[in-house]
């Protein structure tokens, strides 16, 4: 993850101003460390000296546009003086030599290379250890409503990441990145409204994080916004160019802490009036190097009043494939703890439709391929989701009635020829 940021050889205005935006962002985040984190005296001293250096740099180049214009002038003058030179066989143009010859640009690059080293040092020695400290271990049992921080990669169907059988043959994972979201008991918005994801280990794979979609994408050559480098012609940039960002988005640093990311996500949802949002627009993003990603759990989110067998089955399958535990979050209890109604109106309406659907055997009876596995799925859902996640008694009762009917029908009418005892009750 080191030495990823670099001024483009072509000298672009967008790249130039991204460097100054990054410097300002680093100062803000160093202030966050000072206000919110408990750090050793040595780490605090390093952060203090780093902030002092960056602030001094910004004072020297107080008007970046003036320096941009000065560099352009130096480049133009060089080109005018050497425009008649024969470049055949040189392997470089007059423009490239003019950029390389700019004294002002070389001075600025030297100063900012130190800023980039400061960022890398903070990330390696302070930021990553904080991620490891704050992220909840996936093997830790939690009660409904307990505090947690999970790093979750969501997706459609059975998600394939390192650890999936045959994954190395399926994808060139060493040249790829993964996007995930930091979820907590205060905010659990997931990409595409998903309710299932893979919990990732907090480790050196973490490249950067941002309150909003970071706009991560592959690029051929490095720039100021580069946060991962796979080869000379393959890298990943993250963040919106400073000249285009306005009040939304902006440069993405490598040193945002999980505490800051969670706090800013919650604050942004409150400001938008979408507290405990389910919308993709309110998802934060953490970018990781896929080659270092480790799956440690499966995350299943329930709203506390639903029959969501399809997503739960996906979670069960992925738990078995990766050999990791399932961790379940009942957002109804989280919402109540935040002073909100436990369910959204649309959740209640959807639940009533689910009860009607699953209560009518014509909707599902012929779709059961393996009654025994179906029974196990119903039992696990009822025990692990409905009971352990403390669904309200009236909701539990409705689900129990529906499940008892489903188990009775599937075991009496769909199991001819199988050595099966009388259909058990949901409580067995």
Image (spheres, rainbow, N blue to C red):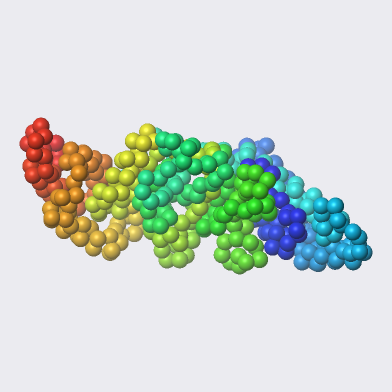
Quadrant of the image occupied by residue 14: bottom right
The spot of residue 61 in percent (x, y) is: 79, 60
The answer to whether 6 appears left or right of 344 in the picture is: right
The spot of residue 13 in percent (x, y) is: 72, 64
Count of residue discs: 0
The answer to whether 335 appears left or right of 71 in the picture is: left
Q: In the depicted view, which residue is nearer to us: 235 or 92?
A: 92
222 w.r.t. 200: above or below: below
The spot of residue 10 in percent (x, y) is: 75, 58
**Quadrant where the N terminus is found in the figure:** top right
Q: In the depicted view, which residue is nearer to us: 260 or 277?
A: 277
The spot of residue 154 in percent (x, y) is: 42, 49
418 w.r.t. 13: above or below: above
Question: In the orientation shown, which residue stands out farthest toward the top?
Answer: 419
**Quadrant where the C terminus is found in the figure:** top left
The answer to whether 85 appears left or right of 199 in the picture is: right
Quadrant of the image occupied by residue 420: top left
Q: In the depicted view, which residue is nearer to us: 331 or 177?
A: 177
Could you tell me which residue is drawn at 66 percent across and 42 percent down? Answer: 2
Say if residue 413 shows up in the picture. yes
Could you tell me which residue is drawn at 18 percent across and 38 percent down? Answer: 372
Say if residue 258 shows up in the picture. no
Could you tell me which residue is drawn at 25 percent across and 48 percent down? Answer: 309
240 w.r.t. 202: above or below: below
């Amino acid at each position: 993850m080191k030495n990823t940021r670099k001024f483009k050889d072509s000298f672009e205005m967008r790249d130039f101003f991204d460097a100054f935006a990054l410097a300002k962002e680093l100062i803000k985040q160093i202030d966050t460390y000072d206000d919110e984190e408990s750090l050793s005296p040595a780490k605090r001293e390093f952060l203090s000296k780093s902030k002092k250096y960056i602030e001094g740099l910004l004072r020297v180049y107080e008007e970046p546009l003036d320096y941009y214009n000065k560099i352009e002038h130096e480049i133009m003058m060089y080109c005018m003086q050497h425009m008649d030179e024969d470049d055949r066989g040189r392997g470089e143009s007059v423009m490239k030599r003019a950029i390389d010859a700019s004294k002002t640009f070389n001075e600025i690059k030297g100063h900012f290379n130190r800023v980039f080293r400061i960022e890398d040092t903070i990330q390696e020695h302070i930021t990553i250890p904080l991620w490891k400290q704050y992220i909840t271990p996936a093997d830790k049992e939690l009660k409904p409503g307990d505090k947690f921080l999970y790093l979750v990669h969501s997706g459609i169907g059975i998600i394939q990441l390192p650890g999936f059988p045959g994954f190395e043959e399926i994808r060139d994972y060493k040249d790829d990145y993964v996007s995930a979201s930091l979820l907590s008991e205060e905010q659990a918005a997931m990409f595409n409204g998903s309710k299932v994801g893979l919990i990732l280990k907090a480790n050196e794979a973490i490249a950067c994080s941002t309150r909003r979609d970071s706009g991560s994408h592959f690029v051929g050559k490095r720039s100021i916004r580069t946060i991962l480098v796979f080869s000379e012609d393959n890298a990943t940039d993250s963040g919106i160019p400073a000249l285009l960002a306005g009040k939304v988005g902006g440069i993405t640093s490598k040193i945002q802490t999980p505490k800051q990311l969670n706090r800013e996500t919650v604050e942004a949802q409150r400001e938008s009036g979408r507290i405990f949002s389910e919308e993709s627009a309110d998802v934060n993003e953490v970018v990781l190097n896929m080659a270092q990603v480790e799956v440690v759990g499966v995350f299943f989110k329930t709203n506390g009043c639903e029959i969501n067998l399809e997503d739960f089955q996906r979670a069960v399958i992925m738990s078995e494939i990766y050999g990791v535990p399932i961790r379940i979050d009942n957002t109804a209890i989280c919402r109540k703890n935040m002073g909100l109604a436990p369910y959204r109106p649309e959740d209640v309406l959807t639940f009533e439709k689910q009860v009607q659907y699953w209560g009518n055997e014509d909707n599902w009876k012929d779709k059961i391929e393996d009654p025994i596995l179906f029974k196990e799925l119903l039992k696990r859902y009822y025990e692990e989701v409905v009971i352990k996640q403390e669904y309200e008694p009236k909701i539990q009762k409705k689900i129990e009635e529906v499940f008892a009917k489903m188990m009775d029908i599937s075991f009496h009418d769909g199991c001819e020829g199988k050595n099966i005892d009388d259909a058990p009750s949901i409580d067995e």
